[in-house]
Amino acid sequence: MTRARAVACSNIALAKYWGKASVAENLPATPSLSLTLAGLRTITEVEVDPSLSCDHAELDGAVLTGRPLERVAAMLDRLRARAGVSTSARVVSRNHFPTAAGLASSASGFAALALAGARAFGLDLPLETLSDIARASSASAARSLFGGFVALPAGGRCAERVASGEHFPLSMVVTLTAKGAKAIGSTQGMQHTAATSPYYAPWVSHSPKLFDEVRRGVLERDFERLGVAMEQSALMMHASMLAASPAVIYLTPTTLAVMAAVRELRAAGTPAFYTMDAGPHVKVLTLPEHAARVAACVEAVPGVERTVVTGSGPDAALTDEDPRSGE
Ligand code: PMV
């Protein structure tokens, strides 16, 4: 086969990965556990083309150059090495994400690229191996090969499923607080935190406890246990960044206002907990029957642009969908 298309969903970490055990191999220093989300999908096509002299890549209609193109080519190189071929490829990818975006798309992007690229180069690899290949590009992408609740151990090479989405149906109210790309990339932010923050070592040493609490909360369908540990994981990760020199600050006044609104909702009896990644957006985890109320509440916070309410998504898979067709 010379052409393949794949779809992968993004994921949000409930227990966070922040810091690398090995920069050269891109191995995580902390164990993470995520929920794959149906509402945030990437579709990627890879076509092997002997007439090309180098790899070409297009994301959302724009041709990639520089570092983003290098990252795509580096993954294709790993796939070519496995397949024993040297042919260049054309990559076309589309994020079916909310338009205000600024949401991390590397997770779904590299997961979809790993699967489509492997197939296009004639490789039939299990999800575990594809997860390892995706992890080398972006550790969070390792988790996007699997649907439902997914773990990536500290130092781990590939992610593993913890439970299906049906095991514990949850809703994520993705709350978009600002337009625009993030100020500082996650790799740079992590390395700067590791090098300069006195809170980095305590974060890394405490993270297995939070991971374990999140995992138990998922397995035992204990929403309170899961939510409390999830918030602490996000806040402790951000605390390690805030203590870096200079500080890495992703949280904005709107982020803090949404967090306050969620705490108020909770005090009034609605089960809801927040988490934030390397950006200003807030993802609010709740039970499906409370999702509409939570969305209405956070949408009323000044500075919030919109919400996307979504539940758990499936494994990455081959697809017929054309990434050239729009939303
Ligand atoms: O995989 P990266 O380099 O995009 O890093 C992801 C880091 C966080 O999103 C902040 C946390 C996580 O576990 O996804």
Image (cartoon, rainbow, N blue to C red):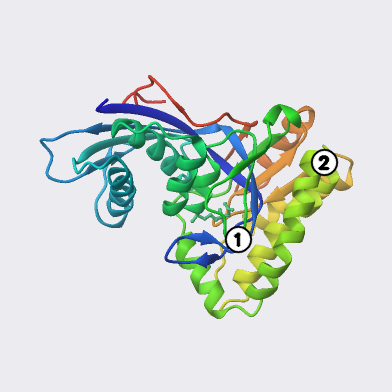
Q: Is residue 277 positioned above or below 315 on the image?
A: below
Residue 104 visible in image: no
Q: Residue at x 53, y 78 (%)?
A: 195
Q: Residue at x 64, y 64 (%)?
A: 238
Which residue type carries mark 1?
Answer: Leu
Q: Quadrant of the N terminus?
A: top left
Residue 182 visible in image: yes
- The answer to which quarter of the image holds residue 245 is bottom right
Residue that badge 2 annotates: 223
Which residue type carries mark 2?
Answer: Phe
Q: Is residue 97 positioned above or below 75 on the image?
A: above
Depth check, front residue: 221 or 79: 79
Q: Position of 287 compared to 161: left or right?
A: right
Q: Nearer the viewer, mark 1 or mark 2?
A: 2
Q: Secondary structure at mark 1?
A: loop
Q: Quadrant of the C terminus?
A: top left
- The answer to which quarter of the image holds residue 234 is bottom right
Residue that protrudes farthest toward the top in the picture: 320
Depth check, front residue: 212 or 304: 212
Q: Position of residue 189 (x, y in %)?
A: 50, 66
Q: Secondary structure at mark 2?
A: helix
Q: Is residue 92 positioned above or below 177 on the image?
A: above
Residue that badge 1 annotates: 251
Q: Position of residue 126 (x, y in %)?
A: 48, 34
Q: Position of residue 50 (x, y in %)?
A: 13, 35
Q: CA–CA distance between discs 1 and 2?
A: 25 Å
Q: Position of 58 compared to 275: left or right?
A: left
| Ligand 1 within 8 Å, label 1 CB | no
Q: Residue at x 35, y 33 (%)?
A: 123
Ligand 1 location (quadrant): bottom right
